[in-house]
Image: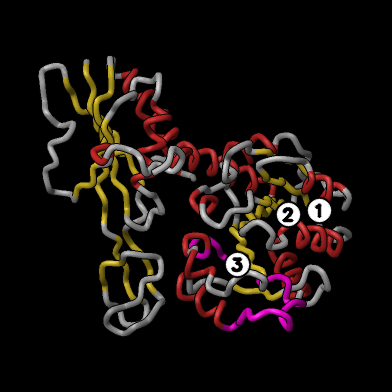
Amino acid sequence: MCDSCGCNQPENSVTITRPGTKSGAGHHHSRQERIVAVREAVLGKNDGIAAHNRDFFKKRRIVALNLVSSPGSGKTTILERTIRELREEISMAVIEGDQQTMLDAERIEATGVPVVQVNTGAGCHLDADMVHRAMHQMDLSDNSLLFIENVGNLVCPAMFDLGEAAKVVIISVTEGEDKPLKYPAMFDAASLCLINKTDLLPHVDFDVARCREYALRVNHHLVFFEISARTGEGMPAWLAWLRSQI
Amino acid sequence: MHEMSLAVSIVELVSDKAQAAGARKVTAIELSVGRLSGLMAEALAFCFEAAARNTLAEGAKLLIRELDGRGNCLTCGHSFVVDSLLAQCPQCGGYAVETVQGRELKVVSFTIDE
């Protein structure tokens, strides 16, 4: 029992009822009570803003990619390398999401592309409104790539549409190959999967084939790229995919 | 802990509509939650209590109606109940399953005191 995770709440505060069965709770009708029908998605507001973002990106032919992963998988290093390799050919910009600090934005700024840092405070994910506000703070070019580096978290960002063209999930070989089974929601939501830090494969027990198999169990549409952002190994295929999106 | 964001979304959605309906107070909120939606009912209830404080929805009861997931096997065509995103077809053992139900996360209705 503790005060932070909800385990100390009274048992009757959660009601779980199958459709078609009567629970009675909250439905004792008196004269002053009235039921108002809603039938709206809980995330309807977020999804509306995401649709607005998506329209904007489409009109400007901006390909927005939402990069999601655990903390430490190498998202920022992948971006640094990607930007350095492509900056002569393609306009790019980055929205950085972290709970605190400007550290990642400073790393991206050093590469010379426009960047805005979103600090979520205690928030565990970016939402569509944060991206909307961020993208209006930057000068985005037509026919460009916009990378949105989400807060390092393999759970919550899966639920929030930002208006991106695709979610790119990143897993590094220093994590377990069973991550797709443990955190299926993110692999389910993603279209692409980057397996990063492959230069470390000789030193770790990570089984790439098994990781891919597990991820495909969750999402049979996933497309994989095995890369090392540090050495550049495997990067050409990822860069070719990015070029093909513009 | 995305449940906090969801709780705030629910409170905003319901409070706005309750105010428009002339409510003095919201006494209950009925939600439809698919089993594949990634929502933890207990965590949501906990966050809701905090998110609803000082709003029309303060003290409202959450009625969470869970909705089974449903999937179609792309290998053999079998349609079955799925309880996770790792669904395996009980007929052919395949993992290529298209989920067709269970990701919903909706406010169905709410009850007000007028």
Q: Is residue A180 left or right of residue A148?
A: left
Q: Amino acid at mark 3?
A: Leu
Percent coordinates x, y for residue B47 in the rendering: 41, 36
Instruction: In this rendered view, identify the residue nearer to me: A234 or A60.
Output: A234
Check if mark 1's residue and mark 2's residue have beta carbons within 8 Å. yes
Q: Is residue A96 in the magenta section? A: no
- Find disc 2 in the rendering and name its residue: A145
Amino acid type at mark 2? Leu
Q: CA distance from mark 3 to mark 2?
A: 16 Å
Label 2 crowd bin: few (<14), some (14–19), many (20+), radius 10 Å? many
Q: Quadrant of the N terminus of chain A?
A: top left
Rounded to the nearest whole Å, what is the CA distance between mark 1 and mark 2?
A: 6 Å
Q: Residues within 10 Å of mark 3 (few under 14, many from 20)?
A: some
Q: Which residues are magenta?
A: A187-209
Q: Is residue A194 visible?
A: no
SS for callout 2:
strand
**Image quadrant in which you'd find residue A236:** bottom right
- Asked if badge 3 and badge 1 are on a common chain, one would say yes
Given residues B82 and B2, the one toward you in this image is B2
Residues under labels 3 and 1: Cα distance? 21 Å
At x 57%, y 47%, the residue is: A163
Give the residue pinned by disc 1.
A91
